[in-house]
């Protein structure tokens, strides 16, 4: 078969009136292979068909013809069973031929299964997959630098990492396709359409939370493995894979090439070697743009609900009324009612004392009203002077800038006091100012709200991603007591490692 081309008749069994029977037969052989039964006779095929739910009437001639078609399409192979003892000629005819799936048949049925799973599945942006990738990178680094770790363990962790990467790529690609279709869709049921778009906006916003921090963690993990040597990693994984010997070409070069492609794909997503934007950044941009677009669509849906009809529909209905008016006087009355326009600008003016002149009095019976000369020229009845000068707010801006600078300095000083050079006991902080203690308490809360990783470490990160805390369970039952000007705090004596970007503990001493 030419590389990159699918045989033209490979999926011929999916077309025609007997496509259901052909697919059922291939499924029966696939499930038999899972039970290590590689060859089936015609009676075995019939039994397998019943086990997968095929109960249609099927004569031996029809089943033999279907098996023959699959053989002609090179999806099944036929061999003669010389190991059996046959008592009659009819038994020989039924049990002599044994059928088995060819490699093309396995590929064809796997293609149909994959197509059906894609049609039935939905894509997703899963934060858990990103965390799993970061966790497997840490586990892989630990295994590579562990002297007693076996090559089989390296192969196992690398396989898990590639599985999570494949799940990320497949789910993201499918979710992006569904998202773009949603952006182009026009829902018939506005209520359901509105709910779906609102839920999608919330889903995207939740996924984007701390996405940059997670991507940075994965990028750092890739960098550490690159320093160890990707080729060394793949060589150890190859030894741990224990590939079986084959009569044809050596499978090891193709296996190593597949591993390199997976690693290049991981780099492309989080740390491209050529300096180009990472795909996770493109995903971030697409998600942000989708949120804006969905919010705009939601605004239009809400506006359309608020208005009983659009301005265009109102003017069209008014035009119909004009066309159906019986007389010219009705046209003028309709015009005045619809637009309320008049050439007289002083009709709204009233007398200084409205109680002396009734509002229902005729104009010719009522005394004249003074009209300002400005009304005709400018449309105003009073002359307005210049507005007051805008006050100078430079001093206020300077004071606010100084306040913001002082707050940043206070925050930086707090992080400097809390930064540690590796894990320390919580009790090592001793006595803290109340503001610094509040920062520490916030970090502890962030770490305790997350689940522990495989090493039992809980991680917490501030919203700006500059401060990270690693929290481990105390090795003993000793309690920690911290003192502040407003009281004291007691709790388990955790192992705490506070990492602040650009700050080390020894720099603050």
Image: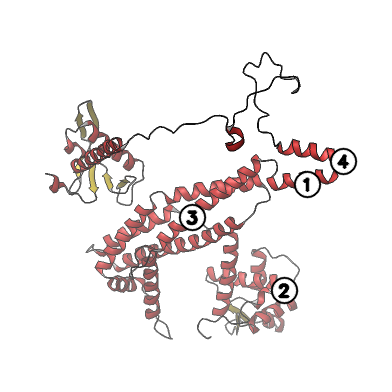
Q: Nearer the viewer, mark 3 or mark 2?
A: 3
On the image, numbered disc 1 is attached to which residue?
A: 319
Q: Is residue 324 left or right of residue 223?
A: right
SS at mark 1 in the image: helix
Earlier sequence position, callout 1 versus callout 4: 1
Rendering coords of residue 342 (x, y %): 71, 36
List the single residue furthest toward the right.
326
**Would you say residue 125 is visible in this rendering?**
no
Query: Label 1 to label 2, Cα distance in Å?
Result: 62 Å
On the image, numbered disc 3 is attached to which residue?
A: 289
Q: Is residue 210 left or right of residue 333?
A: left
Query: Considering depth in this image, is 258 or 268 the residue closer to the camera?
Result: 268
SS at mark 4 in the image: loop
On the image, numbered disc 2 is attached to which residue?
A: 18
Earlier sequence position, callout 1 versus callout 3: 3
Residue found 66% across the figure and 33% down from its top:
345
Query: Considering depth in this image, is 462 or 95 the residue closer to the camera?
Result: 462
Rendering coords of residue 319 (x, y %): 78, 46
SS at mark 3 in the image: helix
Residue found 33% across the figure and 71% down from its top:
274
Would you say the residues marked 1 and 2 are in contact, meaning their CB atoms lie under 8 Å apart?
no
Q: Is residue 90 left or right of residue 177?
A: right
Earlier sequence position, callout 3 versus callout 4: 3
On the image, numbered disc 4 is attached to which residue?
A: 327
Rendering coords of residue 260 (x, y %): 36, 73
Q: Quadrant of the C terminus?
A: top left
Q: Quadrant of residue 414?
A: top left
Q: How is the image coloured?
A: secondary structure
């Amino acid at each position: 078969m030419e590389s990159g081309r699918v045989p033209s008749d490979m999926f011929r069994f999916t077309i025609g009136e007997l496509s259901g029977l052909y697919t059922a037969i291939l499924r029966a052989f696939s499930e038999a292979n899972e039970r290590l039964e590689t060859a089936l006779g015609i009676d075995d095929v019939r039994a397998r068909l019943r086990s997968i739910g095929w109960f249609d009437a099927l004569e031996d001639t029809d089943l033999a013809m279907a098996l023959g078609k699959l053989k002609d399409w090179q999806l099944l192979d036929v061999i003669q069973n010389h190991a059996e003892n046959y008592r009659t000629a009819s038994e020989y005819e039924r049990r002599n031929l044994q059928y088995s799936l060819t490699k093309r048949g396995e590929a064809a049925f796997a293609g149909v299964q994959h197509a059906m799973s894609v049609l039935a599945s939905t894509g997703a942006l899963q934060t858990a997959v990103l965390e799993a990738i970061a966790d497997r990178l840490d586990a892989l680094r630990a295994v590579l630098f562990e002297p007693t770790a076996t090559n089989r363990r390296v192969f196992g962790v690398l396989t898990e990492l590639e599985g999570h990467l494949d799940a990320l790529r497949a789910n993201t690609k499918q979710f992006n396709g569904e998202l773009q279709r949603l952006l182009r869709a026009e829902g018939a049921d506005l209520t359901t359409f509105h709910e779906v778009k609102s839920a999608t906006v919330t889903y995207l916003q939740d996924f984007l939370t701390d996405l940059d921090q997670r991507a940075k963690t994965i990028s750092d993990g890739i960098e550490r493995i690159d320093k160890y040597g990707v080729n060394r990693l793949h060589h150890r994984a190859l030894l741990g894979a224990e590939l079986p010997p084959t009569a044809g070409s050596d499978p090891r070069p193709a296996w190593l090439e597949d591993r390199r492609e997976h690693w290049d794909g991981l780099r492309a997503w989080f740390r491209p070697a050529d300096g180009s934007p990472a795909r996770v950044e493109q995903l971030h941009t697409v998600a942000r743009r989708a949120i804006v677009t969905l919010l705009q669509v939601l605004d239009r849906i809400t506006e359309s609900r608020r208005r009983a009809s659009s301005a265009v529909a109102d003017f069209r209905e008014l035009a119909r009324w004009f066309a159906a008016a019986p007389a010219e006087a009705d046209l003028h009355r309709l015009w005045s009612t619809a637009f309320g326009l008049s050439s007289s600008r002083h009709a709204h003016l009233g007398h200084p004392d409205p109680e002396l002149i009734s509002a229902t009095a005729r104009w010719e019976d009522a005394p004249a009203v003074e009209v300002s000369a400005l009304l005709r020229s400018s449309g105003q009845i009073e002359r307005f002077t210049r507005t007051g000068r805008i006050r100078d707010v430079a001093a206020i801006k300077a004071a606010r800038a100084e306040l913001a600078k002082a707050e940043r300095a206070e925050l930086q000083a707090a992080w400097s006091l809390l930064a540690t050079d590796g894990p320390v006991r919580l009790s090592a902080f001793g006595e803290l100012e109340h503001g610094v203690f509040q920062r520490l308490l916030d970090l502890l809360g962030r770490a305790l709200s997350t689940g522990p990783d495989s090493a039992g470490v809980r991680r917490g990160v501030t919203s700006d991603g500059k401060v990270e805390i690693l929290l481990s369970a105390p090795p003993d039952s000793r309690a920690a007591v911290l003192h502040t000007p407003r009281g004291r705090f007691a709790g388990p004596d955790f192992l705490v490692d506070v990492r602040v970007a650009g700050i080390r503990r020894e720099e603050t001493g």
